[in-house]
Image (tube, rainbow, N blue to C red):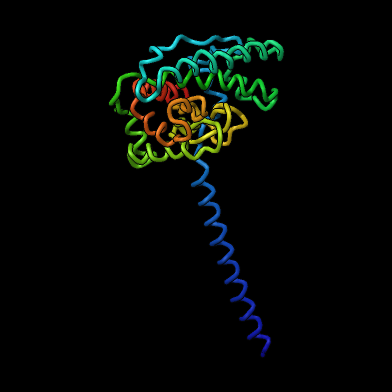
Amino acid sequence: MTTEQNSRRDFFKKASLSGIALFVSSRFSFAAKASSPVGVSLDQVISKLAEYQLTGQSKQNPLPYGYADLEPSVDTKTMEIHYSKHHAAYTKNMNEMSTAANTGSKPLFQLFAEIDKYPVPLKNNAGGFYNHLLFWTILAPAAGQVPEGKLLAAITESFGSFDKFKEIFSNAGKKQFGSGWAWLSVDEHAKLVVSATANQDNPLMSTTEVKGIPVLALDVWEHAYYLQYQNRRPEYVEAFWKIVNWKEVSRRYDEALLAIK
């Protein structure tokens, strides 16, 4: 092969490799831009929420309905034990532990945002206090409510339809291994996300994989349903949809949007 032929061969080889490198580089840059939308840190917005005033010394709120008012979805005895025993215990323990940790006056949401710095028992009981406080508010005796307006539009945009959202959220609760919660939250991009957490963790905690401002919650600890449903958690999850207080969920969604935007 002549020197001229070798030179031509080397030229085309280098040109080909350069083109491939340019193509790969362009594709990578495009993917990086598309997968990195600009959002805000949740730490920047939680102080705008009304519940930011809660601290480790906060107390239980009265239930907005009677123990029997959620029948037949949740039986009277379960509601009484759940509120007066379990939630009361989380509240008492949180009050005592936050005093011992010198965090009694710290806003609860700030505590959650740096919960990895604190003992696990404080995390469990502070989470148990807040998760139940939220849970009681998004339940209502009136059956047949459905989401409307901006919330329904956001659900449809995020999940395709309300029925599809119900399926995804229900599965998060049904498939959560052991004790825990299912959540609908507003993330830092103002988008709705469904997640599940173990124990008394919640989306406001620094240790949680899927973070956001929770607007809907479902307790799937056995103490929430076992007296009535025993091991039939899926039946409990389906009954939950009959007592969701969508007006309160919508209010929380609107508040989260205002805080983020």
Q: Quadrant of residue 89?
A: top right
Farthest left residue in view: 144
Q: Name the residue nearer the viewer: 5 or 60.
A: 60
**Up-down: is 70 above or below 104?**
below
Give how far across and how far down residue 187 sits, in percent.
49, 32
Farthest bottom residue in view: 1
Q: Name the residue nearer the viewer: 198 or 186.
A: 198
Give how far across and how far down residue 218 sits, in percent.
46, 28
Give how far across and how far down residue 69 sits, in percent.
35, 16
**Up-down: is 126 above or below 197?**
above
Q: Is residue 193 visible?
A: no
Quarter placement of the C terminus: top left
What residue is drawn where x is 33% and y is 27%? 242
Quarter placement of the N terminus: bottom right
In-image side of 240 versus 187 (left or right): left
In-image side of 257 versus 27 (left or right): left
Count how many numbered circles sit on residues in the image.
0
Q: Name the residue nearer the viewer: 192 or 27.
A: 192
Give how far across and how far down residue 50 sits, in percent.
48, 14
What residue is drawn where x is 34% and y is 21%? 247
In-image side of 104 versus 245 (left or right): right
